[in-house]
Each structure stands twice: as C-alpha cells, then as structure tokens.
Image (tube, coloured by chain):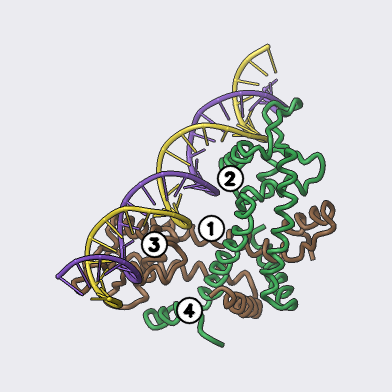
Chain colours: A green, B brown, C purple, D yellow
DNA sequence: AGAATTCATCTTGACGTCAAGATAATGGAT
DNA sequence: ATCCATTATCTTGACGTCAAGATGAATTCT
C-alpha cells in the first residue's frame, strides 16, 4: 500500500490537527483528482477533432436523440448539468462553426429547435468513435471486476443527488 | 436496479449506434457527474465563510504545512493541479482579502514566500472544521464498507496518473 | 568575467461557466 | 377581455482557469 499524493496531505493534517477525522477527505480528494485527470484525457481527444467536451456534449445529445436530430435548448439543458446561459453560449459557438442551426418552431414562438447540420452529424460520428475508443483505453486501467465494482458504487452514490 | 440518468443516455446510444460498446461511458459518466455534484456541495460550505474551494486549497496547504505557515508559490503549486498563472491569481486575491502576505526571501531574490496572516489562520481553522464536517456528511451517503471499497479502487486508478 | 541556460514567478488574452435578471410568448384565472 | 403567473430563451457581468510567453534572478559553462 504505497503512499500517494492524497496520503501525504492526510498525514500533514493528522500531524497538525489530530482532532479531525480525515478519512472522508481521502475518498473525496481522490475522487476529485481522478475526475480532473480523466477529464483532461478526454478533452485531449476532442481537441484533435477541433472540439471540446462542452461542444461534444451538445452534438452528442442531438445525435443520440435520433432522427431528425433536433432538440430544443430546454431539452438539451435537461441532458447536461449546466445553466441556460451556458447552453446559449454553447449553441452560439456550434452555430458559428456551422455544425448546428437554430430553426424557429412554428407551433410555439417562444421556443427554438437546434438541428444538427450535415457537417455536425459527420463530425459527431467521427468524434464519438474516437471518444469511445479513448474511454475504453481509460477504463482498461482497471480490471473488469474493479470497473464493475466502481460502477455499482458510483451508481448508488449518484442516487443521493439525482 | 433502477434506471438513472446515465442509463438513459446509454440506452439512447445502444439504439442509435448498436456498434459501439458503451460500458466505459457508463462508469466515466457517473464519475464525472458525481464529482460535479460533490464539488458543488463542497463549494457551498466555503461560500458561507466567504471562501471558495480555490482559496481554501491555498490556505489549507499553508495551514497543514505547519508553523510558521509559509510556503513558496512553487511549493503551493506542487500541492494543487493548477498552472502557475492560476496560482498567482489565487494568491493575489488572498492577499487582497488580507488573509496572506507576500514576503521576499532574502536568500533567493527570485522567490517569494506566501505567509498566512493571523486573519487567514483564524479563517482557515474555522473553514477546515466546517469542511470536514461537510465531507463527513457527504461520505455518510455510502455505507462504511462501500466507502473503503471506493477508496481502494480510486487509489489504484490514480496510480495510473500520478 | 561574460554568455547562455535554467528557474521562479507573473502577465496577458482567451475561454467556459455561473447567477441574476431581461425579454418575449403562452396559458390560465377571473 | 384582461391580467398574471409561467415558460423558454437569451443577455450581462463576473470569476476561475489555462496556454503561452515575459520578466528578473541565479547558475553553469567556457
């Protein structure tokens, strides 16, 4: 059981503040660090295609919704963990890049439909292939039984928030 | 085994792209979502003390380094996962808030020492107490055996990056 | 000693995000 | 018929972060 970065932080706290129980800090610290590393690895793959994780999330939501690859900003919002202002910003950029377009909805003039353009569809198909291959590489750093144990615990943990 | 948000995304991909193996997307997606939720919960606690996670990280590094609570920006950098520009920015703010001060190092004029001021020490002591209590609440959402299983897997996973 | 290299820190410009609120259209209640 | 609350989207201003490079000081090499 080698000492890692988080262990060294915990050891410092135990020396300086022996009154506090740092066990929770260990798990939560590791989760945060790991999530940062994994996020950066994932970002790299998208960067090679001229995308970001942020843009991909929107394109992917449109793609996996099925034909005709159209969703309202509100629908898109529901699939992510961002605010409406951030979604507007993401759509603006994708529109500027020619990957999606805003279509007005004749049935409800308050709302708008975001549609994947052919260029966006083509790009997201290539991106998802590269992304999934990369995710496979990243999860392969754990053994299959560790992956499924991790997944089960994360799933339970998430129910506390969703 | 109820269906969660990530399951719904995976089901969409399986329908639209039956050729791809979405298993890795499940674990990694859950890890990212959970990390975001936990990060927001943690941020809330610091907000009540007029701090952010970012500021706390710096104050905490100084506090747990022990007396006289002084580290160079380089030392601080090594304990975090941010760039030097971001560290300068964090120190600027803490200095502006009167929580730390920059001391010139007479032994090496290239470098600087960041010192906790009494106000900073007082605040970080209160912050770490509140933070640890909050972390305890957050980890208590899992059973003790789940917490330790999670910790063990995360520790192993992290070795791939550190 | 002088020049080139390395090191420690800071600056700049850009980006993604958020909170709060603005705008505009709809639907319901009286 | 009008008013009001709700819904959908966008705008604004601020913040934290990063990548790239600038600055100033120390070290190494000749």
| Callout 4: chain | A
**Residue C10 in the image: above or below residue B110:** above
| Callout 2: chain | A
Q: Is residue B75 left or right of residue C14?
A: left
Q: Which mark is residue B84?
A: 3
* Residue B75: quadrant of the picture: bottom left
Which residue is tagged 1? B40
The local crowd at label 2, few if under 14, some if 14 to 19, many if 20 or more residues have their Cα within 10 Å, is few
Of tags 3 and 4, which is closer to the observer? 3
First along the sequence among labels 1 and 3? 1
Q: Which quarter shows the N terminus of chain B?
A: bottom right
Which residue is tagged 2? A83
Describe the element under mark 4 as helix, strand or loop: loop
The answer to whether tags 1 and 4 share a subunit is no
Describe the element under mark 3 as helix, strand or loop: helix
Which residue is tagged 4? A21
């Amino acid at each position: 059981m080698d000492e890692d970065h988080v262990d060294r932080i915990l050891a410092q706290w135990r020396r300086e503040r022996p009154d506090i129980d740092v066990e929770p800090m260990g798990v939560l610290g590791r989760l945060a660090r790991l999530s940062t590393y994994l996020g950066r690895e994932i970002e790299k793959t998208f960067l090679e295609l001229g995308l970001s994780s942020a843009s991909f999330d929107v394109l992917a939501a449109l793609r996996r919704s099925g034909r005709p690859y159209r969703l309202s900003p509100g629908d898109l919002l529901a699939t992510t963990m961002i605010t409406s202002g951030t979604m507007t910003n993401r759509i603006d950029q994708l529109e500027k890049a020619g990957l999606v377009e805003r279509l007005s909805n004749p049935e409800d003039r308050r709302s708008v439909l975001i549609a994947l353009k052919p260029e966006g569809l083509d790009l997201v198909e290539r991106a998802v292939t590269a992304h999934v291959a990369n995710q496979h590489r990243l999860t392969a750093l754990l053994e299959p039984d560790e992956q499924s144990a991790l997944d089960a615990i994360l799933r339970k943990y998430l129910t506390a928030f969703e």
